[in-house]
Amino acid sequence: MGRVPPDTVVENGILVDVATRRLIDGFHVLISGGRIVALSRDKPKTGKKTRVIDAGGAYLVPGLVDAHYHIESSRLSPRRHAQITLPHGTTTLFEGSHEICNPLGLDGVKYLLEEAEGLPQKIFVGLSSATPPTPYETAGAYIGRKEAEKALKFPGVAGVDEVMDYTALFGGEERLHGVIEAGLASGKVVEGHGVPSPPQADAFLATGVSSTHFSGDGAKALALLERGCFLELKPRDARQAIRELVAAGVDWQMVGMCVDDRPAERISQLGHLDYELRICIEEGLNPVTAIQLATLNNARHWRKEHEVGIIAPGRRADILFITDLKAFEVNRVMADGEIVAEKGKLIADIPIRPAPAYVLNSIKLHRPLTAKDFEVKAHAGKTRVKAAVLHPFYFSADLQPITKELPVKGGIVQRDLNHDVNKVAIVRRDGGGMGISFWELGYTRGAVAMSVLHDTHNISVVGATDSDMAAAVNRVAEMGGGIVVVRDGAVKAEVPLPIAGLMTDRPLPEVVAGLDKVNAEAAKLSPGKLLGPSPVDTQTFIFLTCFPWGIVLTDRGLVNVRTGQPVPSVW
């Protein structure tokens, strides 16, 4: 009303109005107490302490809002993660907490919310619907209806995240439906996963699930949009869908975007949600519409448009200063009314708090493992056996295409390194057992072990020798979690991740350098082409048990996750 001078005035900017999808010149943006209080065409009255920021003709864009994200996949603690992503313009994110909840349960939610206190980057938590991810594997914790009802009352918990076990969903499994029902009863959002086709898509949405983070083509996107599903595009994996939706002339109000997962070294190379937004523009989406997807649409879906996603009175003063909308290079970032980053560099002080004891030391093997623990025995008298030899992203439940013969020596089934066949194990982080099978991954020497294993975050290890596998797993346990590369019995590279075995609060340059070295040393083990250009990161994902996977290795052995039936590794 002009009775009290504002703390800050931003002038000489072009407002990107995501409510009307227009560019508006001539507004002064008035800010007090970290929130926008007015948009004025008249020059406002200022006081002695009022700060005036000249935007220099830059476009004023709402801070970016990531609709679906896992901080844990960056390998960084939430506050370290904010240090690297705020300069890219991500001022709000909706965190899918099943990564940290599987090791820690509701303590994982508690940790995320504690880290978010006083942070310029807003973190809203989606409660894990996937602890454990399926009934066919062992997690470190359990979240059912009772736990969900408790957590959904926590300030900062925005809903239920990522319902992804289709077998349990369509089969009426009690735990999962209890979590969904708790979310619906609380009046909060329930998020989905995957790209089901009709009639599964109809059943998926009829449960109360409202969205999915999307990779696929335009036909699949339209089928979901027609059914009222909010699409959180992962643009890097949805270029064709973007082009086809542009050509179809859709109304974009039910479309947002997200990053989902990205390790710190890739954030350093590519960017964050700004990178995904640029892809949308490259594929033909109008820049203002693309910005709408990355701001207001995401905020509205999560029912937080009164807080974030638009430059308007009452909202948080999260503003990006952009000189070229099409290039979308973030020049300055304001969060809660303060400039926190300029020219890609963080200028705000984000103190790093010591990690609380309850998130540390979550990996406890009963004893150090030996090479003998990784032996796979053949039936007596066998010189060759048939084996299920999986490879990354094998989505079928058909055993025949992955059945191969392997040699036997001294009663022990051998790898076939000449044909890229390695041995793989999933070791429970509490030391309670392991599953072992053979995979076509290509390493000709050494082993790679890690406690980053979506989604249970037990320890996975891939190896060309049993002794190197044992050494790698033992080192992961000694560090309290992390990623380790071993060759000829020696640790060649490692990144300790002591926070739930998933994250670290070490300085960013140190973590990125460590991850780069791990990737370089893993590359020296000659991984096969099936692991792709980032074999270490690929290893974190290839043991997923959610849709659309079929036969998967868990700590209990090979399982058909569509039926729950065990699958023999050798016969």
Image (cartoon, rainbow, N blue to C red):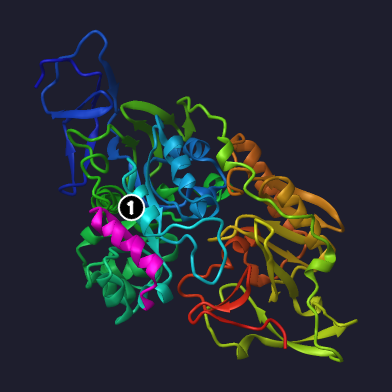
User: Which residue is found at the position 39% from the left and 32% from the top?
Assistant: 120
Quadrant of the rendering where the C terminus is positioned = bottom right
- In the picture, measured across the screen, residue 308 lies left or right of residue 163, that is left
Magenta stretch holds residue 175: yes
Give the image location of residue 524, x and y in percent. Answer: 77, 59
- Residue 249 as seen in the image, left or right of residue 233: left
Number of numbered labels in the structure image: 1
Outermost residue on the top side: it is 48
Which image quarter holds the N terminus?
top left
Residue 40 % position (x, y): 13, 27
Q: Nearer the viewer, residue 516 or 186?
A: 186
Dividing the picture into quadrants, the one containing residue 140 is: bottom right
Residue at 42% over, 39% down: 113
Q: Which residue is nearer to you in this view: 317 or 458?
A: 458
Query: Which amino acid lies under the numbered mark 1 shown in the image of this protein?
Result: Glu
What residue sits 56% from the left and 88% below the top?
Answer: 398
Residue 239 in view in this figure: no
Q: Mark 1 points at which residue?
A: 149
Residue 60 locus on image (x, y percent): 27, 36
Q: Where is residue 215 in the image (x, y as percent from the top left)?
A: 41, 67
Residue found at the very far front of the displayed protein: 146
Residue 259 covered by magenta stretch: no
Mark 1 is surrounded, within 10 Å at the Cα level, by few (under 14), some (14 to 19) or many (20 or more) other residues, namely some
Residue 60 seen in the figure: yes
Region of the chain picked out in magenta, as a range? 171-191
Residue found 44% across the figure and 41% down from its top: 110
The secondary structure that most of the magenta stretch takes on is helix
Q: In this view, does 276 lie above or below 305?
A: below
Above or below residue 564? Residue 503 is above
